[in-house]
Structures are given as structure tokens and as C-alpha cells.
Image: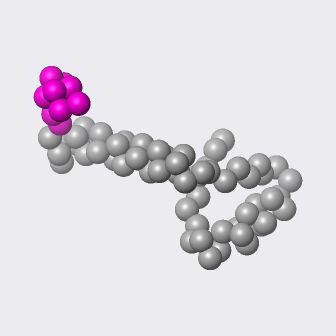
Amino acid sequence: MKILLEVPTSKAKMMIELLRSISFVKVAPLSKDKSRRVDDLIEAMAEVGEIKRGARRGKPLKQFLDEL
């Protein structure tokens, strides 16, 4: 299982050291670029959830493709 944690920069070193001290945990910090992509995906999934719940309206596919 993979878990994404968001930690303040001032506490990151301590958190990484703590996690590395646990034998069954693998630590792999994300680059800024990958972190941005993960944030974008999380935001996109939240938008999809809002559309499914009816809290937000989706765009027709043709309109979406025309905007690209």
C-alpha cells in the first residue's frame, strides 16, 4: 500500500528519519514535478466526485476537446 503524506518543510527531515527507522516502510520523496502532478490528480478526482454528486456540472466532451 502506498500512502502520500503532506508534511511542513520544517518537519520533513524529522519525518523522513522517523519513517526510515521503521523496517517495513520504504521512503521515496517526490520531486516537485511529481508532487505537482499528484496534487493535480487529487484535485481532478475531487472535481469528478463533485460532478457525480451533482454539486458541479460537467462539460460536454466536445466542448472540452474544443478548448484544447
Q: How many marks?
A: 0
Residue at x-position 52% and y-position 48%: 33
Q: In this view, does 14 lie above or below 2?
A: below
Residue 34 in the figure: left or right of residue 41: right
Q: Is residue 39 above or below residue 51?
A: below
Residue 27 in the figure: left or right of residue 2: right
Q: Which of 33 and 52 is in front in this view?
A: 33
Colour pattern = one colour
Q: Nearer the viewer, residue 44 or 35?
A: 35
Q: Is residue 65 one of those drawn in magenta?
A: yes
Residue at x-position 17% and y-position 45%: 56
Q: Which residue, as the protein is rendered here, is positioned at the far bottom?
A: 10
Residue at x-position 24% and y-position 38%: 52
Q: Position of residue 19 (x, y in %)?
A: 76, 61
Magenta region: 58-68
Q: Is residue 67 one of those drawn in magenta?
A: yes
Q: Which of 24 and 64 is in front in this view?
A: 64
Quarter of the rendering occupied by the N terminus: top right
Q: Where is residue 40 in the image (x, y as percent from the top left)?
A: 40, 47
Q: Is residue 61 above or below residue 38?
A: above
Q: Where is residue 30 in the image (x, y as percent from the top left)?
A: 62, 51
Quarter of the rendering occupied by the C terminus: top left
Q: Can residue 5 be seen in this view?
A: yes
Residue 11 in the figure: left or right of residue 36: right
Q: Where is residue 62 in the image (x, y as percent from the top left)?
A: 15, 23
Q: Is residue 49 visible?
A: no
Magenta stretch, main secondary structure, is helix
Residue at x-position 73% and y-position 63%: 16
